[in-house]
Image (cartoon, rainbow, N blue to C red):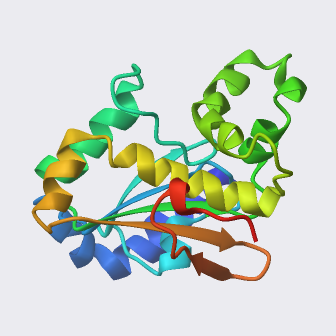
């Protein structure tokens, strides 16, 4: 099915059955979750969480990276601030995934020399490599560690600090395995407490 065919099917078959639901969204949005995940086409946040339009506020980028505040990544920073300060989300989930190309690139930065924009972007997670400089880091461990690093970066945002201190916001880390449908819920709360299996 082409994208145009998909739009036609949505407009003629799907939308009419859900018209009231979409009309309610006209008055605004009140998602409970900011969902930060990878741009990878194999990840569908609404499908894996079984949520409807209006229930997730989503940031997607290569490697589900949360740049540290103040480094000039205003799109991500503004979206986090809007989610926390305006929408008052009650949780932020950072969701990594199996076979992540961005994390694979992070583990082999030399392979990205011909793609400087990608190299510079994934280097936002370079602290993960520094933490395990003396040890071999498997892709699976790096994917988990990358999620924890992004949670640490989130904790540096003033709006996140205020909301978590007030007990209004919870930070969660997930790893989705698209080949099995399983989701790992990470128990570690910080990269500092992360141990390689």
Task: Count up the numbered dots.
Answer: 0
Q: Position of residue 129 (x, y in %)?
A: 71, 40
Q: Is the N terminus in the top left, top right, bottom left or bottom right quadrant?
A: bottom right
Q: Given the current orientation, which residue lies at the most extreme front position?
A: 134
Q: Which residue is drawn at 15% across and 67% down?
A: 168
Quadrant location of the C terminus?
A: bottom right
Position in image of residue 31 (x %, y %): 24, 66
Depth check: give the residue in front, 167 or 56.
167
Seen from the viewer's position, the closer of residues 19 and 111 is 111
Residue at x-position 68% and y-position 19% = 117
Percent coordinates x, y for residue 28 in the rendering: 14, 58
Quarter of image, res 56: bottom left
In this rendering, position of residue 123 left or right of residue 116: left
Q: Is residue 60 above or below residue 23?
A: above
Residue 97, percent from left and from top: 67, 63
**Does 75 appear above or below 28?**
above
User: Would you place residue 36 above or below residue 183 in this image?
Assistant: above
Is residue 71 rendered to the left or right of residue 3? left
Can residue 117 be seen here? The reply is: yes
In the picture provided, is 136 more to the left or to the right than 96?
right
Vertical comparison of 109 with 117: above or below: below
Give the left or right position of residue 180, taking residue 35 as reference.
Answer: right
Residue at image point 86% right, 51% down: 136
Can the viewer see residue 1 in this picture? no
Q: Which residue is drawn at 79% across and 20% down?
A: 115
């Amino acid at each position: 099915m082409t994208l145009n065919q998909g739009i036609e099917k949505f407009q003629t078959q799907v939308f009419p059955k859900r018209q009231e639901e979409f009309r309610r969204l006209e008055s605004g949005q009140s998602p409970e979750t900011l969902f930060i995940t990878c741009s990878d086409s194999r990840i569908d946040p609404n499908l894996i969480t079984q949520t409807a339009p209006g229930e997730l506020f989503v940031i997607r980028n290569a490697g589900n990276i949360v740049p540290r505040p103040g480094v000039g990544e205003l799109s991500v920073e503004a979206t986090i601030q809007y989610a926390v300060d305006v929408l008052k989300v009650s949780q932020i989930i950072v969701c990594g995934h199996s076979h992540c190309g961005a994390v694979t690139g992070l583990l082999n930065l030399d392979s990205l020399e011909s793609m400087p924009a990608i190299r510079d972007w994934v280097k936002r997670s370079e602290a993960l490599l520094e933490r395990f400089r003396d040890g071999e880091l498997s892709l699976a461990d790096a994917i988990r560690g990358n999620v924890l690093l992004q949670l640490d970066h989130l904790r540096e945002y003033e709006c996140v600090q205020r909301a978590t201190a007030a007990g209004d916001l919870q930070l969660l880390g997930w790893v989705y395995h698209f080949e099995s449908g399983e989701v790992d819920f990470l128990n570690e709360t910080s990269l500092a407490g992360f141990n390689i299996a």
